[in-house]
Amino acid sequence: MSVIMRSLSRRDGLFLVFGDLVVLTISLYLTLLVRYVEPPSPDLFIAHLLPFSLLAIAWLLVFVIAGMYEKQTTMMRLQLPDIVARAQVINILIAAAFFFLIPYFGITPKTNLVIFLIISSSLIILWRLTLFPRFGFKNREKAILLGTGKEIQELYEEVKANNHYALNFECVVDVHRDGNPNDIQRDVLKRITKDGVTTIVTDMRDREVELILPLLYNLSFVQTKINIVDMANVYEDVFERIPTTLIGPEWFVEHVTSDRHTFYDAFKRTGDVVAALIIGVGSLVLYPFVWLTIKIEDGGPLFITQERVGQGQQSIAIAKFRSMSGTKSDTGADVLKSKKKVTKVGALLRDFRIDELPQLWSVLMGDQSLIGPRPELRDLVSVYTDKIPHYTARHLVKPGLSGWAQIHHQAHPHHGADITETKVKLSYDLYYIKHRSFFLDLLIALRTIQIILSRLGK
């Protein structure tokens, strides 16, 4: 069932790419039709199709960076017009530069690009919002959710509203309601016989669920059409994060190992060194300007150093451009009781992550990676370890400058301790630790670029 639930990221992801290419091709034809007020000749269309096909590669990459191939959740659909508009403006700028720098194709379609921008943006939004939803699963498997709590409700609402999941929840059976296990068993049996339910998704760690597990297992043995699925797996596939409330210690034994990542770790280290050298050397040109603006604002030091917790809970020292009022170095205890404020220059440095640039040297030293869970201050780690189950699991891998949590959870705490938001942040870190790969790292890097560019547009 877990494989079925990943249909959006595989089948639908490829379908979205194919649909976008078709839309771009149709948009080109309609652009020439509008521009010349007659159907374009084959020669004219082909003359434009070749350079536009080359541009389509860059345009699809922009779509990836913009997040247009992530899971098409309800919230994603609401934000789609704004996302498409931003992506298409960038795409047209790329096209303009392309035709200016490469006059080989013999066309300089300035007016055509403006027309193409309008037509393609409109058709992409139309395709994504009205046509793509029609290609969901026609006959979704009927299922019930067995459990209670916030995660149960989140899962129910998201899957119910999106026909691109193979399951369709008929209802939620609250196992914590008043009554005895026999009442719940009768309710489950009624749903199976009356509604044709074939899948039961349940939280295996819920003590109330344990009371009716014998019934569920009997159903799966006697009626081969009944599937019993762990809610943790379904929730992970839908939301791409793993809340600690849905897993136990056995989860780490089963899913988090280092042996299968040996080649990946070596490849990633090589990529870290090469990228950190290129970006680090290139960024040196910014250092004098950062120093000058910091000195003009408050005359304080350029850098701060902090002790953070790295892989294996080892202490690592990181340097950053100073973005807050204060001294040369900070400790976790300072942050917990700090009254320091972000400076005006510091806010700008943080918006574009310029304050993180000195950390590239710790990437070269091997203390950090470009991609991974963000390293936390030692005193904050002590607080979170005491309050949040499995928090130390994030130290199984090398910390990074950007990570899965940073691109998905913008509400993560920046100053002081925040147990609630850090639990959410940890759920994304656990997902990354389980699924880390070259392609996931590449996606995080591209989405990080999108976040920085979006701040540039504000």
Image (cartoon, rainbow, N blue to C red):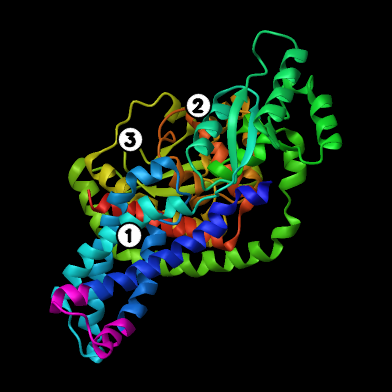
Question: In the rendered view, does 177 fall on the left or right side of 442?
Answer: right
Q: Which mark is residue 124?
A: 1
The residue under the point 42% across, 60% down is: 64
- Against 275, residue 102 (above or below) is below
- Left or right of residue 297: residue 143: right
Per the image, label 2 sits on a secondary structure element best described as helix
Tell which circle, 2 or 3, labels the residue nearer the N-terminal end: 3
Residue type, numbered disc 1: Ile
CA–CA distance between discs 2 and 3?
28 Å
Quarter-of-image position of residue 287: bottom left
Residue beneath the point at 46% across and 42% down: 306
Q: Judge the density around disc 1: few (<14), some (14-19), many (≥20) Cα neighbours within 10 Å.
A: many
Q: Nearer the viewer, residue 64 or 228?
A: 228
- The x, y position of residue 339, in whole percent, is 34, 25
| Residue 43 shown in magenta | yes
- Magenta stretch: give its range: 31-50
- Which numbered disc, 2 or 1, marks the residue that appears first in the sequence? 1
Percent position (x, y) of residue 119?
23, 64
Q: Which residue is label 3 attached to?
A: 326
Residue topped by disc 2: 420
Amino acid on which disc 3 is placed: Gly
- Secondary structure mostly seen in magenta is helix
Q: Is residue 441 above or below residue 391?
A: below
Asked if marks 2 and 3 touch (Cβ < 8 Å), the reply is no
